[in-house]
Amino acid sequence: MRWLVLGGSGFVGSAVLHALHAAGIDAHALPAPRLATAADTPAALLAAAAATDTTGLETAMAGCDVVVNAAGLATPSATGGADLLGANALLPAVAARAASAAGVRRLVHLSSAAVQGRTPVLDETGTVRPFSAYSRSKALGEQALELAAAREDSLAVVTVRATSVQGGGRPTTAALARLARSPLASVASPGTAPSPITSVGSLAELVLALGRHRGALPPRVLQPWEGLTVRTVLEAAGGRPRVLPAPLCRAVVRAGYLVSSLVRGRLDGHVRRVELMWFGQDQVPGWAADQGLVPAPRVREVLAGAATPGAGGR
């Protein structure tokens, strides 16, 4: 098999490329085209994709069996704009169009569980509840890709909803380790809620399994839970979190979203991070568990490495 990783030099893309090479797969990276658009509906994005020149992508994808779209702007605090929509909402449909024209067999698109926002239990349905410009752009990307896939009979498309992915050298992982060791580290009582914190190594292993899978794939696959709770996440990162009364935490979160609404939601991403630290988020076992394809958990060692002085987050 021959694979192409779109955005293969990025945080997730490079981890996927490493996993493919380690498995002996002929895989190559390709920088994603810079796209910008004002389209903000799935139908408008599909029309924009049809008007986009994909000649270069088709040439690069020729002869590939599997294409992984690991490109995009991972900026949860972004306030929107044409670049965000181009990278996260338009590119998936453009990649599908190019892959189909090039004769690619399977497209694995990396999305985010953020598309389901504050839903109590993450799942693999098409239901989305975006709460920020970033999560809306990723949700639009999923929806536009679904429309594009319906037009491409020869191309199998699967969307992977990654959860809160951590890895060595990632600034968000280093920031999590600093938070865990600070006086702000805390959880809502009793501290046993599941946390969606996961590892980039396990995500790369899941992508590999999806690309190799011989049977049909579902439209969406949720990255499996790696077994940590809100408390054990902070402990693994070197912290000793305080346990706060849950009613107090809920009141603070409600107040935070209220203040954010007064500034047009610009604080939603920050409030959401605090909410996740306190309450976590549950998720269904999902398709990967049903198929016996749950990757080995690695996030505990990732967080321990980030907590080690002088480790550089590795």
Image (tube, rainbow, N blue to C red):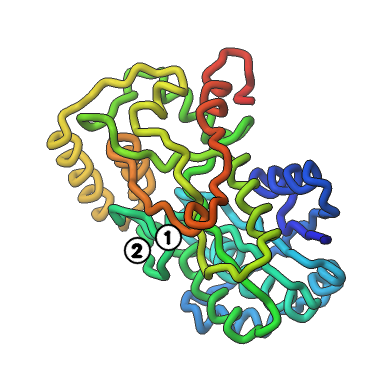
Q: Secondary structure at mark 1?
A: helix
Question: How far from the left and from the top, in percent, is residue 32?
Answer: 72, 60
Q: Are marks 1 and 2 in contact (CB under 8 Å)?
A: yes
Rendered residue at 25%/55% (across/down): 261
Residue picked out by circle 1: 115
Rendered residue at 57%/13% (across/down): 309
Rendered residue at 45%/55% (across/down): 113
Residue picked out by circle 2: 129
- Choose between 175 and 111: the one closer to the eye: 111
Q: Is residue 11 above or below residue 85?
A: above
Labels in figure, total: 2
What amino acid is found at the position of numbered circle 2 in the picture? Arg
| Quadrant of the drawing holding the C terminus | top right
Question: How far from the left and from the top, in percent, is residue 80?
Answer: 48, 60
- Choose between 6 and 159: the one closer to the eye: 159
What amino acid is found at the position of numbered circle 1 in the picture? Val
Question: How far from the left and from the top, in percent, is residue 264?
Answer: 31, 58
Neighbours of disc 2 within 10 Å: few (<14), some (14-19), many (20+): some
**Residue 175, labelled with which disc?**
none
Q: Is residue 83 above or below residue 300?
A: below
From where the camera sits, is residue 263 visible? Answer: no
Q: CA distance from mark 1 to mark 2?
A: 6 Å
